Image (cartoon, rainbow, N blue to C red):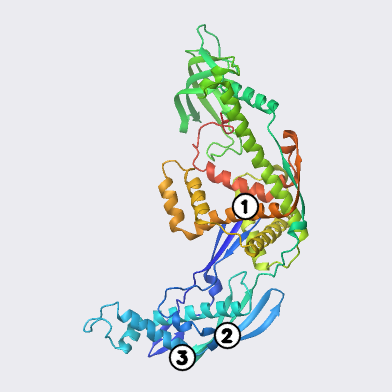
Amino acid sequence: MTLYIDVLGGFRYVQWHAGMAELADALDLGSSIERCVGSTPSTRTSLRSFQGYGSASGRSYKVLFSNLGIIMQVVQKEKQGLKHSFEVKIPRSVINQNIETKLQEISEKVTIPGFRPGKAPATLLKQKYGGSVVGEVVDFTVRDSYTKALEEKGLRAATAPKVEIKEFGDDKDLVYTFDVEVLPEIKISGLDKLKVERIKCEASDKDIDEALKTLSERHKGSRELTEKRPAKKGDHVTLDFLGKVDGVAFEGGEAKGYKLHLGAGNFLPDFEEGVVGIAVGETKDIPVGFPVEYHAPNLAGKTATFTITVHKIEEETESKVDDELAKRLGFAGLDDLKEAARTQIGREYDSVAREKNKKALFDILHDEFDFELPQGLLDDEFKSIWKQFEEAKKNNQVAAEDKDKSDDDMKSELQDIAQRRVKLGLLLSEIGSTNKIEISDDELRRAIIAEAQRYPGQEQKVVEFYSTTPQALMSIRGPLMEEKVIDFIFDVANVTVKSITKEDLFTADDSAKSPAKKSAKSSKKAEASGDAETAKPKAKKAKKE
């Protein structure tokens, strides 16, 4: 998984009265922090990108703060592990200087009756714009000064500093304190001594033959019956149906000319079993029970009556793995189909092996490196995982082995996963930074195009979205960086390659049962199913052909 932080805070509470700035509310920049969370495909790390708090480039008074590091006074009040507390004092002259500069900039842009642009008196400008200008200047001063203070001390903030104004008013210096948790110092060494085993699996001729046999079964031909007989399992039946609950038809419960493959399991069992035995031209009412966990609340646990009329029955014909099958699927012949199958299966094996290799590498890195973790990051990561889990519970998509666990037990498991993600994320980020691993513009552009291609007809909108939304762009950049860092480690580590069978490749390990992974997947499934037709009597998703 991938995290990004930005400070959006502003002073909403500074008012100007008779040339005096008064603080109406206490300053808390911590409350104005916006956290943007994106999941990486592996969902095992929390790779962070820190943009720097308080960045305000382009403002007219930025130049006046160029020597702020010399002007301001910074005193460390407390240090406990990764937690630091500082007091900062900024001369009032710096604030005043920037207020005047900002007011002058405003006077050149706005029109005030009776005055030419840039000629309005300062007192009038203060009356009209003073409150907002003081707020903006003080906001910038605080953010810019604590950023510089941390830079001078060689510290990197892990979470947003919590700021409290201690003193500020008419002719008074700005004095504030800020508490901050910083990133740990991670020493990266010995990557070349890591012993890592990489697995690989080649597609065998047997694998290809089995895949083509399965393919032929899915693409069997069919012929319409010439003799009259009842429908049976395996037939393709064209029918009309109308469903009612307590005599009332429900939305999505009607279709005409629908082609149903009996035995494919695409509809509820009661429905398919009820169609078996009906001949062409016959109409029959059948009872269909909806599961208690059915996705449509108005149908869950209820029994509907479906009126079925069969119009046509087609029986399957034997399908062979030959040139005819290949041509039906758009290939020149069987050899081309086999080559395409080998390529596709090879990619699938490589993808699964890649994920298992990454998991094994993460296990090694997690055990090999030891450093203190910022509690703020752990808390934030746990909240994100717990939210996914609760979403899965709400949609009744929690893994079977987790359904009877107490919240305390689940929280304990998920906190361990949060710890692993944060640790690996910080570690991979540091490895990338230390070794100057970067994402090129071309790599980023290709990734955006690949993402856009997942939305046919909306490609341009997707590209524009990522081009204009920095936070979304980081959700693309994060996984790319993770993959590049992983490749780097594999390149420098002491790697041995082990060939394994397909059976071993697809044997689940304990990590596959991770509740966090299941929750994340379940949450995505819930989102995907949100637009499903409410009342179509499906028991499960149709098998892909």
Q: What kind of residue is marked 2? A: Val
Disc 3, SS: helix
- Pointer 3 local density, CA inside 10 Å: few below 14, some 14–19, many at least 20: few
Q: Between residue 171 and residue 329, name the one nearer to us.
A: 329
Quadrant (top left/top right/bottom left/bottom right) for the N terminus: bottom right
Image height check: is 259 above or below 503?
A: above
User: Which of the 4 image quarters holds residue 49?
Assistant: bottom right
Name the residue that disc number 2 marks.
Answer: 88
Image height check: is 2 above or below 247?
A: below
Q: Between residue 10 and residue 105, name the one nearer to us.
A: 105
- Image spot of residue 341 (x, y percent): 60, 29
Name the residue that disc number 1 marks.
Answer: 483
User: Which of the 4 image quarters holds residue 262?
Assistant: top right
First along the sequence among labels 2 and 1 = 2
Contact between marks 3 and 1 (CB within 8 A): the answer is no
- Image spot of residue 406 (x, y percent): 72, 52
Residue drawn at the location 62% of the way across and 30% of the way down:
342
Name the residue that disc number 3 marks.
Answer: 93
